[in-house]
Image (cartoon, rainbow, N blue to C red):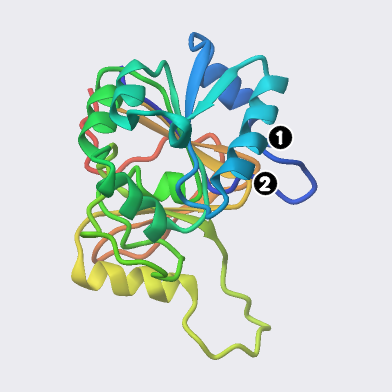
Amino acid sequence: MKRLLLVSSSKAYGSGYLEHCEEEIRQLFAKSSRVLFVPYALFDRDAYAQQARQRFGEMGIELTSIHEAEDPVEAVRKAEGIFIGGGNTFRLLRELQGQGLIAPIGDRVEAGMPYLGTSAGSNVAGPTIKTTNDMPIVQPASFVALDLVPFQINPHYVDADPDSTHQGETRDQRLTEYLEENDTPVVAIREGAMVIVRDREVRLAGQAGGKLFRKDTGPVEIPPGQLIDGLGVVRE
């Protein structure tokens, strides 16, 4: 059974690193004694890996980092779980592509290896990274990502402020523009929210809700705890 936890952000207001999603992380990796961390989204991989290793250690989970492995592909094949952290989505995807990790990660997750993504790590779980909020600081080979779920993720989603004097596009407008050119639905999740995928079941969890954007329809509010339909997910 496919199992994913796609978190909007590694921190929520008023809590520490991975604190707001600790219970869900423990449940996801309950049968995984060692988890492989992917720090490619940040420049200082050593510091990032140390932060994640310490936090996972507090949860009683051993964490190794893929950037320290002699053979990254083999590290994925031997992993009992994988955690892809946040940062810049373009940098992350370029490295995943360059290291030849797209297919190996996909194969392992399809076979049941639990997957945790935060921010950029959630972005790359979708078919493409076209709904990321990040600047293209580097150029990946393509926007095609891991394609672990049949919908796009937009993390760090923010609602339009009616009192704002900002004249640029709102997040809703940007996601509507995406759907003018693309058909894949988008799950936009506010900070503090997360998407839990268990095979065919997709549920919104966490402290905040989100929105579902689909082509030719207006956005639909998703409250915490609700199953998400309309994603192209086959339901029995």
State which quarter of the image contains the N terminus.
top left
Quarter where residue 160 is shown: bottom right
Between discs 1 and 2, the one toward the N terminus: 2
- Residue at x-position 54% and y-position 48%: 8
Q: What element carries label 1?
A: loop
Where is residue 70? Give x, y as percent.
37, 28
| Residue visible at 57% across and 44% down in the picture | 193
| Identity of the residue drawn at 72% across and 21% down | 58
Is residue 196 found left or right of 107 in the rendered image?
right
Observer-nearest of 169 and 86: 86
**Mark 1 crowd level (few <14, some 14–19, many ≥20, 10 Å Cα):** some
Total numbered badges shown on the rendered structure: 2
Residue bearing mark 2: 11
> Which quadrant does the C terminus fall into?
top left
Residue 140 visible at all = yes
Number of other residues with Cα within 10 Å of mark 2, as a class: few under 14, some 14 to 19, many 20 or more: some
Q: Name the residue under label 1.
A: 19
Q: In this view, does 96 lie to the left or right of 44?
A: left
* Res 45 label: none
In this rendering, the answer to whether 110 lies above or below 157 is: above
Q: From the viewer's perspective, is residue 231 above or below residue 215?
A: above
Could you tell me if the residues under marks 1 and 2 are in contact, i.e. CB atoms within 8 Å?
Answer: yes
Q: Which of 46 and 131 is in front in this view?
A: 46
Query: Residue 22: horizontal and vertical position, in percent?
Result: 65, 28
Q: Identify the residue at image location x=60%, y=17%.
A: 61
Amino acid at circle 1 = Glu
Residue farthest to the right, as pictured: 14
